[in-house]
Structure formats: structure tokens, C-alpha cells
Image (cartoon, rainbow, N blue to C red):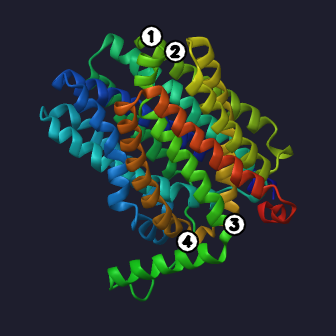
Amino acid sequence: MTSRLRRNGMHIVTLLSAQGVSSVGNYLFLVAINVLVLERTGSAVAVASLWTVQPIASLVVGGWMGSLTDRLNQRTLLAIVEILRGILIVTVPLFSEVGFIYAVLFVFEILGVAFSRAFLPYQTRLVPETKRLRVNGITQMLQSGAVLLGPALAGLILWHNRPNDAIWIDGATFILSAASFVLLPSFRDVPPSSDESSKLRLLREDWKSAVSFLRTHNLVLAVLTVIYLVLVIVEAGNSVEAVFASSALHLGRVGYSELTVASGIGLVVGSVVVTTVATRLKVRWLIVVGLITTSFAYLMYSFSTSLISAGLCLVGLGLFASMLGVGVGTYIQFNLPVEIMGRVMNVIEPIQSLMTVVLILGTGYISDITSVRISMIVITSLATVVALVACVFWMMPGHAKRFETT
């Protein structure tokens, strides 16, 4: 028994290490490819267009990727995805056409969707229920640390070398992540359906089963809908954050970088706090408090007038966003059957991606016809109202047991 627990503990450490290295690689690649495109085109529009690739890729594959990841060996799939991402990245410097870079980024984001769909079910299978909250806190901490470490590592490499060198080093991080996944155990996967020959029919049945599950678990649907709606609204605010820092706060590049660091520090501190006290926290409180405070901190940011006030708001935003992230991750693990987790996300993620694109375009339009501060106030006020209404409802006594994770 002791040896089994020790072995499981080593597997969890290996999983977290693989996920942490992969997260650093994501942010390192993001910075390097932005610099590379800027150097080759000199166009701000070309660089900004890179940010539209991820939601477009999610729209293209998000409706069926979960059907694939639910049926394949998820450990093997995670390793293959990381190898493919590593190989894909190192090909970028070999071509001068910017169109090729966009194509590579598109395939990279598709592989990223596959990774996210497979990782959470695999983590749910590997981590015992009693350890999920703490492990989710550590996962959030690693992701938050990657927000700081990835760009910092990219900046250090770019200071002394070309963007190509950063991209090649980034490719190595994904190969290292793949090697870590190979060391992990392989779980018995869901057997293929007898209707495997009819792919469209299989996908249709998967959608029906996911929609049926969400209809019969209305609180799960309501929680995920509200949380993703608020996160989409916040993402729309993020899309004009650089403009807000420049025109509303009158900050230069250095000031905007300091705001980004402030948010990253908040994420790391919040993750450490949640991980430290994880066993004493209820998932319902993590979600409710995290959702309200995250929305309110972003609302206060939209009213800020100086670097100090904006920085403090973003530290708070990062701190409370960590709390929300851990709560949501744990809630999903306990309320979505691991066998259909990917299929449920088939229904949810494409809608989220479409809403992200629409709200980003809407926020940009409001910024053009009015001002970026007004657009930030509108978008953050909407997020705060949605969060408050939902959380008041969830805090009613009748819903307490429906948030239990035991």
C-alpha cells in the first residue's frame, strides 16, 4: 500500500512537471513568434492577427475533438501531441513566408485543443479524489508561473540571440514534456463504439449524449455557462488592454510590461495561497468568491487612473483568478464523468470561442466609436453583474449540497 501511494505520488509529480514545462513552452513560443512576425513584416496588424488564430482553431475542431480524445489512449495522445508541437515549432525559422507561420500556428493551436481535451480527463484518472483540490492548486500555480517565466525566458534569449534561437529552444521544451508523459501509466480507455464506421453518426450521438447530460444536470450547465461567459467578457477586455494602458493610463511599453508582471505576480501568489490551504476550502466558496472578486477587480481596473492603482487592481485580479481557476477545475472533475468529459466540451468550447470572437470585435467597435475606457467599463460592468446575480443564486441553501465534492 505504501509503495503504491509513493508510486502514485511520483506519477503526480511527473504529470505536473510535464504540464509545467508545456505551459512555459506555450508562452515562450507566443513571445518568440510575435517578435518573429514583427521583424519579418513590420506590421502591427500582422502581429495582432496572431491572436485570432486560437479561437478560430477552436471553432474548427472544438465541436469534435472531444469525441476523439475520449476514445484514444490519453497518455499516448498527450505524448504524441507534445512531440508534434515540438517538431512543428522548429520548422518555423526554416521558412521566410509569413503565411507559413500562420499555418504552423493554426496547426499548433489545433494540437493545443487536443492537449487540453485529453489532459483534464487523464489528470482526473491519475489523481485520487482526496488530492484533486491541492493538485489543481499546484497546476494553477505552474500555469501562473509560466505566465511570468515563459516571457522572461523568451526576453532573456532574445536579448542575446535571434527569435529563431528562442523557437528552437522552445521546441526542445515540448520534446521534454513528451518524454515525461511517456513515463506515466496508461489507463484503460473507453472502448470504441460499434458505430465507429459512421463518423458523422458517431459525432451526432456524442453531441446528443453530451447535451442530454447537460440538460439533466442543470446546475452544472448553469455554473459552466456563467463562468465561461464571465471569462469570455474578461478576454474581450484583455484584447484592448494594451490600448487602454496607452491611451487611458498614458503608459509606454515599460509601463504596460509592468502591468503584465503585476497580473502574473497576483496569479502566482493566489495559486500559492490556494494550494497551501486547499484542504480547508470548499469548492463552492472558491467559485463564488473567485468569480465575484475577479470581476470586481477588473471593474476597478477599468476606473484606474495611474500605474499604481492599475497595478494593484491587476495583482488582485490575478490572485482571485487563481482561486476561481482551482475551484472550476475541481468542480469539473467531480461533476463531469471522465468518460464523456471531452464530449461535453465539444458542446461548450465552440460556443465559448464564437462568443470570444464576437465580444472582442464588439469591444473593439465600442472603443473606436467612443473611447477605450468606456468600452472597458461597459465590458467589466457586464461581467460583474452576471457574476453577482449567479453567485447570489448559487449561495442559496438548496444549492449547497450540489457543490459537494465528496
Tell me if label 3 and label 4 are in contact, CB under 8 Å: no
Residue 219 - label: 3
Name the side, left or right, on which 170 lies relative to 142.
left
Kindly indicate the quadrant of the structure image that contains residue 296.
Answer: top right
160, above or below 260, in the image: above
Mark 4 vs mark 1, foreground winner is 1
What is the x, y in percent for residue 57?
Answer: 33, 53
Q: Position of residue 377 (x, y in %)?
A: 54, 32
Q: Nearer the viewer, residue 103 or 379?
A: 379
Disc on the earlier residue, 4 or 1? 1
Q: Is residue 4 left or right of residue 303?
A: right
Give the CA distance from mark 3 to mark 4: 17 Å
Give, as a three-letter code, the residue at label 2. Glu
Going by the picture, which residue comes out furthest to the front? 370
**Callout 3, which amino acid?**
Leu
Dots 4, 1 in contact, CB < 8 A: no
- Tell me how far mark 2 sits from mark 4, CA to CA: 42 Å
